[in-house]
Image (tube, grey):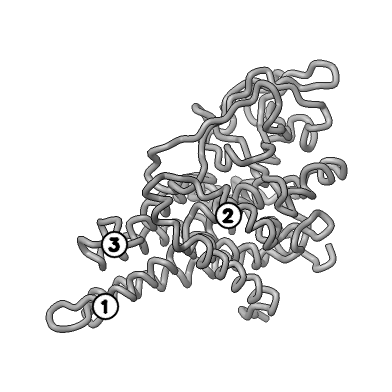
């Protein structure tokens, strides 16, 4: 039986996140965006206290112990106000916490996941490099084993939370194996000698976020900070992206909702030809397409969430949700601008910010071209859903 109703816990979580975003962030986000000022130092402590950062992390590891529907709801409500808020969930909660939960040792979880689940420490994810985005096999950062330490050298780029994270999951090439097989994953603390970070400015969108680069110059970490086994890094990176893409898809639903709400408000207030422009059929057509995009995207997200709750591998379904939801989000923001006319092109209304932010989502966590390739390779039978520890443990209330 298909049940689309939300539990009381889901509703309480959704309303709590919505209240936080509207009360703490909505009044200031436009000014922060114009100043290109990160909102993270202001909101992270509050999100930690509210339990948002560990929403789907088991209580044993400091989280709220809720399921992946709850994670989707949180991401949607956060991105409805601004994409930078959802980026926190993608990077800290999905790419870092869930990856640590899936692959970490008990000792690693105790040291790193527990404080992350509580929100007292922030985790980030370092995969992308100056010459390596979609082409993960071309990763150049290197790790060399010296006694009971690994020494890391290289650079990471387009890393979110770069200036507020306490530690990073860094992917580096260990040994002489080429391609995917040579990659391993490491937990790297930010304050280690040889590690430096810097932020990017003048981005098209997500200007209230914190994105930049990591430089690793002979950074030494203990061997116990290897995540998973040697040469498991590519698998770890891909499972992390399954989680990250899910949050991007869920957040995109928030952009669509925000665009619809802004378009409806303006269509009821603006008058032309002697009536509200909402009475005009072409305006109604725009809004109808926007709503269709929201409904379709939300269904795809909930399907992926259900699979995650069961512990069933969902790479294809999550990729489909990410591809479709982010495309619909860009389309909805674009239509909202069109409905606003010249005013939509100005900074006096939020729809131009929605469009700038939504555009990034079709690129990050794997471009939408990559999501299309995933679909084609599954349909043609070139990619198999092998049981390679690729799926998160199923959700249970007492996990």
Image quarter in which the C terminus is found: bottom right
In 3D space, how far apart are the residues under numbered discs 2 and 3 (Cα atoms)? 28 Å
Residue at coordinates 69% horizontally, 59% vertically from top-left?
A: 49
> Mark 3 sits on what residue?
337
Residue at coordinates 65% horizontally, 51% vertically from top-left?
A: 94
Mark 1 residue element: helix
Of 367 and 14, nearer the camera is 14
Contact, mark 1 vs mark 2 (Cβ under 8 Å): no
Q: Which mark sits nearer the N-terminus, 1 or 3?
A: 1
Asked whether residue 16 is in view, the answer is: yes
Q: Which of marks 1 and 2 is in front?
A: 2
> Mark 1 sits on what residue?
269
How far across and how far down the image is residue 238, in percent?
A: 64, 43
Which labelled disc corresponds to residue 37? none
Extreme-left residue of the structure: 273
Q: Which mark sits nearer the N-terminus, 2 or 3?
A: 2
In 3D space, how far apart are the residues under numbered discs 1 and 3 (Cα atoms)? 15 Å
283 in relation to 38, above or below: below
Of 54 and 399, nearer the camera is 54
Mark 2 residue element: helix
> Mark 2 sits on what residue?
43
In 3D space, how far apart are the residues under numbered discs 1 and 2 (Cα atoms)? 33 Å
Image quarter in which the N terminus is found: bottom right
Is residue 142 rendered to the left or right of residue 278? Answer: right
Q: Residues within 10 Å of mark 1 (few under 14, many from 20)?
A: few
Q: How crowded is mark 2: few (under 14 residues within 10 Å), some or many (20 or more)?
A: some
331 in relation to 208, above or below: below
How far across and how far down the image is residue 19, in percent?
A: 56, 70
Contact, mark 2 vs mark 3 (Cβ under 8 Å): no
């Amino acid at each position: 039986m298909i049940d689309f109703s939300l539990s009381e816990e889901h509703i309480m979580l959704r309303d709590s996140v919505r209240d936080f975003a509207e009360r703490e962030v909505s009044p200031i986000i436009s000014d922060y965006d114009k100043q290109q000022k990160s909102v993270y130092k202001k909101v992270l402590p509050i999100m930690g206290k509210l339990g948002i950062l560990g929403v789907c992390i088991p209580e044993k590891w400091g989280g709220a112990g809720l399921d992946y529907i709850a994670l989707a709801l949180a991401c949607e409500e956060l991105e409805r106000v601004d994409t930078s808020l959802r980026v926190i969930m993608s990077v800290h909660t999905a790419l870092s916490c869930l990856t640590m939960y899936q692959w970490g040792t008990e000792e690693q979880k105790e040291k790193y996941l527990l404080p992350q689940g509580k929100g007292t420490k922030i985790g980030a994810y370092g995969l992308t490099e100056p010459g390596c985005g979609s082409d993960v096999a071309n990763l150049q950062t290197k790790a060399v084993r010296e006694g009971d330490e690994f020494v890391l050298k290289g650079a990471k780029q387009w890393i979110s939370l770069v200036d507020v994270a306490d530690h990073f999951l860094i992917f580096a090439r260990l040994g002489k194996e080429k391609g995917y097989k040579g990659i391993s994953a490491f937990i790297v603390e930010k304050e280690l000698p040889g590690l430096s970070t810097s932020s990017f400015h003048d981005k098209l969108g997500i200007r209230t976020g914190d994105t930049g680069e990591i430089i690793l110059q002979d950074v030494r970490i203990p061997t116990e900070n290897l995540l998973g086994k040697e040469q498991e890094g590519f698998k770890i990176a891909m499972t992390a992206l399954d989680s990250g893409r899910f949050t991007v898809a869920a957040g995109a639903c928030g952009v669509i909702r925000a665009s619809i709400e802004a378009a409806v408000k303006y269509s009821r207030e603006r008058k032309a030809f002697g009536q509200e422009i909402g009475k005009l059929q072409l305006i109604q057509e725009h809004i109808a397409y926007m709503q269709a995009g929201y409904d379709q995207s939300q269904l795809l997200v909930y399907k992926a969430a259900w699979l995650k709750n069961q512990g069933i591998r969902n790479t294809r379904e999550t990729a489909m949700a990410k591809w479709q939801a982010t495309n619909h989000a860009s389309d909805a923001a674009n239509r909202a601008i069109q409905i606003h006319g010249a005013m939509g092109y100005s900074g006096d209304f939020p729809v131009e910010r929605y469009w700038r932010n939504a555009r990034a989502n079709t690129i990050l966590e794997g471009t939408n071209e990559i999501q299309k390739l995933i679909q084609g390779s599954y349909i043609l039978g070139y990619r198999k859903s092998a049981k390679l520890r690729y799926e998160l443990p199923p959700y249970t209330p007492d996990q």
